[in-house]
Every structure is written in structure tokens, then in C-alpha cells.
Image (cartoon, rainbow, N blue to C red):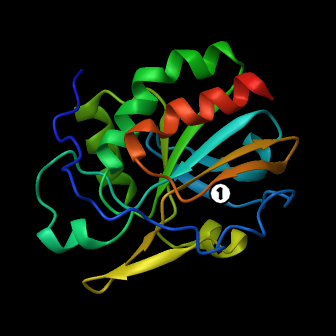
Amino acid sequence: MDEPYGLPPGLPVPVDDGACDHLPGMSMPSVRLRSTTGRHVDIAKISARSTVLFFYPAATGKPDMPKEWDLIPGARGCTSQNCAYRDHYREFLDLGLEVFGISAQRPEDQKEFAVRMGIPYELLSDSDFELTEALRLPAFEFQGRRYIKRLTIAAEDGRVKKVFYPVFPPDRNAEAVLAYLRGR
């Protein structure tokens, strides 16, 4: 399946503002998030195994975001990031890893997106920002709504092993994470 909405040229590149410096070595909290499968997933339990959690602002797969969205460094590219993880999903499984995408979107919106785009891994909804606040993840506001900034956590044995932040370009994040995991 091809990515229907690639990244336009000239997007502002996010800079590392130190907002994730506290994460390496941190224990993953026992927060239960609703999945696109309808189950509740305990973050502490899934991160006891080798797990990749990638956080993104909002994926729609539709060209419905206002032009101002593209001016926010790192905001654009949620669909392309999800599609890259979809396209590399078998490689993560072959390495014995679970993959989860996390946003603050409602579970029903995530499910519609996942079905339409053929996403094989579970998307988790942190719409109450419980995990975001427990991990003190960076977020931003746009048009009166709060969004989680794009970042990726590689977790193992219940702890954060590696953080990818900022993530840019988002469509290359899955490849960067795989390269790290193969070399660890």
C-alpha cells in the first residue's frame, strides 16, 4: 500500500529541546490504554518484553489538516510514519519486538484509520494524557486541542532503553529504530 500523502518539501525541522532527556532508564508506568482491538493494554506489562512505542500527534490519512499544521516543527507526517511502521512491521516481529503507535486521538478515530490504511499493529489512545503525563512527554496545543509530540521509545525489561526525539523525517523513523535495534 503506498503512502497517499507524502511529506511536502520545506517542512520546519524540529530541534531537540531536551524534553525527553529524563526518559532513558525510566520505568514504564502501569497505565492502561484502549487499543484499536478494543482491549486495554497495560504499558508496564507490554514493555516488560522488547517493545517499540512510537508517539505521534494525529493520523488521519486524509488531507484535512489546515495549512498552519505544516508550520509546527514535527507535526506533519503521522500517516507516513504509521505507514512506514506498517511496511517494516514484519522486520520488527522477526527481531522479537512488539510495535504500538500512540496518539491522543479517540480509539474510534484510530480504528477507522487503522482499518483504512491496513495498519497491522495496535494503535493505543492516550486521549486522557495519562501516559503522557506519567512519562512527562512533550506535548503542544493547536487550535484548542492538545497533541503529543512525535517521539519513539524502545523499551525492554519494563524500562526505557532508547528514545528517538525529535523524530524527523517521520517516514524514516521505523528504519532508524530498526537500525538501532539491530546494532544493540
Q: In which quarter of the view is residue 105 placed?
A: bottom left
Residue lying at the far front of the rendered structure: 10
Could you say where residue 46 lies in the image, as x and y percent from the top left? 73, 41
Asked if residue 46 lies left or right of residue 149, the reply is: right
Asked if residue 155 lies left or right of residue 27, the reply is: left
**How many tags in the picture?**
1
**Residue at position x 34%, y 43% from top?**
111
Q: Is residue 3 above or below residue 89?
A: below
Q: Which amino acid, by three-letter code, is at mark 1?
A: Arg
The residue where tag 1 is placed is: 32
Could you say where residue 16 lies in the image, as x and y percent from the top left? 58, 68
Asked if residue 52 lies left or right of residue 184, the reply is: left
Q: Quadrant of the C terminus?
A: top right
Q: Is residue 59 above or below residue 129?
A: above
Could you say where residue 48 lies in the image, as x and y percent from the top left? 83, 40
Could you say where residue 72 lies in the image, as x and y percent from the top left? 32, 72
Q: Quadrant of the N terminus?
A: top left
At label 1, counting other C-alpha atoms closer than 10 Å, the crowd grade (few under 14, some 14-19, many 20 or more) is some
Q: Is residue 157 above or below residue 135?
A: above
Q: In which quarter of the view is residue 171 placed?
A: top left
**Residue at position x 44%, y 65% from top?**
14
Question: Closer to the camera, 166 or 91?
Answer: 166
**Residue at position x 52%, y 30% from top?**
175
Asked if residue 98 lies left or right of residue 39, the reply is: right
